[in-house]
Image (cartoon, helix red, strand yellow):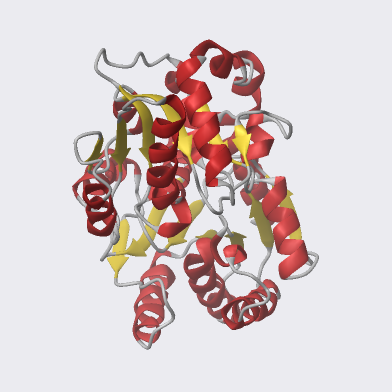
Amino acid sequence: MNGADRPLRIIHCFRSPVGGIFRHVRDLARHHSAAGHEVGIVCDSITGGAHEDALFDTILPMLKLGVTRLPMRRAITPIDLFTLYRYGQVIGDLQPNILHGHGAKGGALARVIGSRLRAQGSRVARLYSPHGGSLHYSPKTLHGRTFFAIERMLERRTDQLIFVSRYELEAYSEKVGPPQAQWHVVHNGVSEEEFEPVVPDDDAADFLFIGMMRKLKGPDRFIDAFGMAERVLGRPLRAKMVGDGESSDAYRQTIIQRGYGARIAMSPAMPARNAFRKGRIVVVPSRAESMPYIVLEAIAAGRPVIASRVGGIPEVLGPDSPALVPTESIDLLATAMAEGVKKPDRLAALMPETEEFRTQFSSAAMADRILNIYQVCSL
């Protein structure tokens, strides 16, 4: 067996086991474990709920290097020193060939720990995928300038950068600086079984929001645009919001205060394909994204999408797609939603052609490309 074919010991480090990053890591773990490599996860222990616990249960048998969960908060806090020390012990004992950090916090921990292991004689490769993360900040803010300075410092301890969209590469180049480490753009992808169409239930709502209940994902924009779409059409509509998050109660209160309680229902996080049955049009009103899985999952399932023109979404729907709306315009989002209800066939026709989409956004192709990167940088 030559060096490129030998089994690798791969550790994924990320903060929150929810949303797109967790989905991304699960897909990589499945494919790479099936290819004979040993995979492990280190992540936060204080986020996630029953839905995420069930997802962990599905991948645990594939994780020969196990799962280690310790508190890892979003903000920088003194507890990070303890987390860094404990994760350093765990990762050092596992002796990985590949240490792949995802998101700002996971990326920082992976590269700091990886650099310390390198100083002790390890040949571990240090990789980083931002997944948006700190790149969502503005360089005009103190937080943004601080995070970008940290990113520049950490890049000197990075062997490979993997971006999930061209947009993410461009944002990194603009805010942090042109990458000095080797870099690659590898789009997220969905599995072959996810291309089975999902048919909405007979009583499905007009609109469906799926995502974390936090401002970045735009639940407030969804609620505002829902009310405006009702006024445009001159009749009541129905919507479903699916997801968890620290602001769930606040959004639920907003719905009640607006008088939408009988028309906008909220549910905890659930598998996306289960949620797709509960709404006819998937609305992605995010203020910022990198390459959101929900758009890929919806298109693969044959569900029409209306989305903010942010991040890598135009790389999926096409840069000139009428299904994209400016993120700052609630009016245009509401108009697009109303038009989608009036002319569902027209909205469906705006979605990417299935075979071309399947070729470009396959999870198997994504995992193979990333595995090739792992193998080259571990030689």
The C terminus lies in quadrant: bottom right
- Residue 113 at what x, y percent from top left? 50, 75
Q: Is residue 291 visible?
A: yes
Look at the picture and state if 176 lies above or below 257: below
- Residue 170 at what x, y percent from top left? 75, 55
**Residue closest to the eye, 121 or 32:** 32
At a point 54% along the width and 62% down the height, the residue shown is 133
- Residue 297 at what x, y percent from top left? 46, 30
Marks counted in the figure total 0
Which of the 4 image quarters holds residue 89? bottom left
Image-based side of 357 in relation to 108, left or right: right
Which of the 4 image quarters holds residue 269? top left
Q: Is residue 36 visible?
A: no
Look at the picture and state if 318 lies above or below 101: above
Look at the picture and state if 96 lies above or below 317: below
Image-based side of 50 in relation to 199, left or right: left
At a point 65% along the width and 53% down the height, the residue shown is 162
**Residue closest to the eye, 136 or 181:** 136
